[in-house]
Image: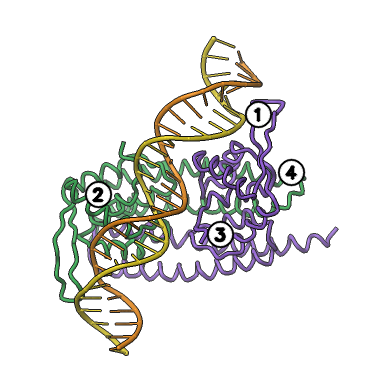
Chain colours: A purple, B green, C orange, D yellow
Amino acid sequence: MPKDNMARYIILGLLSQGPKSGYAIKKWVELSISYFWDISYGQIYPTLRHLEQEGLATMKMETADKGPSSKVYNITDDGREELRKWLRRSEEKQYEILLKIFFGSEISKEELIKKLEGFISKRKIDIDVLEKAEKELRGTPKKDPNEINMLLITTLGVMSYRTEIEWSMRSIEMLKDGKKQKNKK
Amino acid sequence: MPKDNMARYIILGLLSQGPKSGYAIKKWVELSISYFWDISYGQIYPTLRHLEQEGLATMKMETADKGPSSKVYNITDDGREELRKWLRRSEEKQYEILLKIFFGSEISKEELIKKLEGFISKRKIDIDVLEKAEKELRGTPKKDPNEINMLLITTLGVMSYRTEIEWSMRSIEMLKDGKKQKNKK
DNA sequence: AACAACATGTAATAAGTTACATGATTGG
DNA sequence: CCAATCATGTAACTTATTACATGTTGTT
């Protein structure tokens, strides 16, 4: 079983958007997904070598006009296939779905919409659970000195999940519109 | 340098709220903070033993009326001190601050408020960065097939951060009110 | 009798971070 | 010339997960 190995898919995903060096991958992660996922050079360079060995990427030395030369990696068809397999698998990590949306151009919009709908259902259940916990907290006359602190965190959970649901619904609409716009103008 | 080791502080934090067994700790994490932090038995049991060795917790076998007997851990004064040290340090991990709010009853409300104010400032900067990235994305006539996907994720980032700011402001108010209410009725 | 829940634990493995080393090039 | 940025890499370490083993008690 291929385990999680998010770094692998993040790198594959970024390469699917165009050839990049290890250094460039780090920059892109910082720029685009660092707010919910991070990656270090200690993961990037070994993973790139590994991807090459597996035939999922090819390497080419490139002497740039500016700066030192770099090893630029290209994704192969097998690499793209591997990426799609991951994109289609079900998610196990909390925010894995966001990565999949981010690299989602490799699969159809219908598939992404289905994922988002699943995400909405999951979040609705999560909210129910949290709200029950919240009620229990408010209901107890425990005088627990920690009660306020726990309540604050539960509240953030509910607020965050609601935001995620709202975003998901908007995103579904945007994906649907995006498709229609092809026929317009 | 004591490194991150979140498991350690989560366990210490939960013990500060009352004596618990390893099994109970796992249950509590699932119930209360699983939506932004997780922990496995493979971390819990060795960490508990370690905390005991360090004198930060004490263990007592307890034969319950129901079910098998369990090892119940109590936090010591040193353990509480260690927890406070962590609570007062500055955060390095993205959502470490939420853990600290959750276990925050060991430090003063003023200190928590200061942390939340810092969090708001940070998030305002984060939003600026994301919005700039968003504008750049919209501005390019690249026809990148991935553009929509990247935009969706950026949008979620901005929405989430705004939610976090709103929550922080509300939380600051609640913490201030909580203090006043002592004098009321 | 079977199953779910309670309860503890570990060995193997995987994943990720940190600190370090190295060196080229560019802009001031 | 110096600092910043570009660029690659690795060894040691820490952290975390997974799969397994083991046994009790309560419920159906």
- From the image, state whether disc 2 or disc 3 is nearer to you: 3
Residue that numbered label 1 is attached to: A69
> For the residue carrying disc 1, how many other residues have a C-alpha within 10 Å: few (<14), some (14-19), or many (20+)?
few
Disc 3 to disc 4, how far (Cα)? 26 Å
Image quadrant containing the C terminus of chain A:
bottom right
Question: Is A19 above or below relative to A108?
Answer: above
Please give the chain letter of the residue carrying mark 4: B
Depth check, front residue: C23 or A145: C23
Residue B185 image position (x, y, % from top left): 23, 61
Q: Amino acid at mark 3?
A: Ile
Which residue is found at the position 67% from the left and 54% from the top?
A78
Residue that numbered label 2 is attached to: B106
Disc 4 to disc 1, how far (Cα)? 28 Å
Query: Are both tags, 4 and 1, on one chain?
Result: no
Residue that numbered label 3 is attached to: A97
* Left-right relation of A129 to D23: right
Residue A66 image position (x, y, % from top left): 69, 25
Q: Amino acid at mark 2?
A: Glu
Disc 2 to disc 4, how far (Cα)? 50 Å
Question: Is B163 above or below relative to C8?
Answer: above
Which residue is found at the position 49% from the left and 58% from the top?
A3
Label 3: element kind: helix
Label 4: element kind: loop
Residue that numbered label 4 is attached to: B140
> For the residue carrying disc 4, how many other residues have a C-alpha within 10 Å: few (<14), some (14-19), or many (20+)?
few
Determine which of the numbered discs, if any, sits on residue A182 in the image. Answer: none
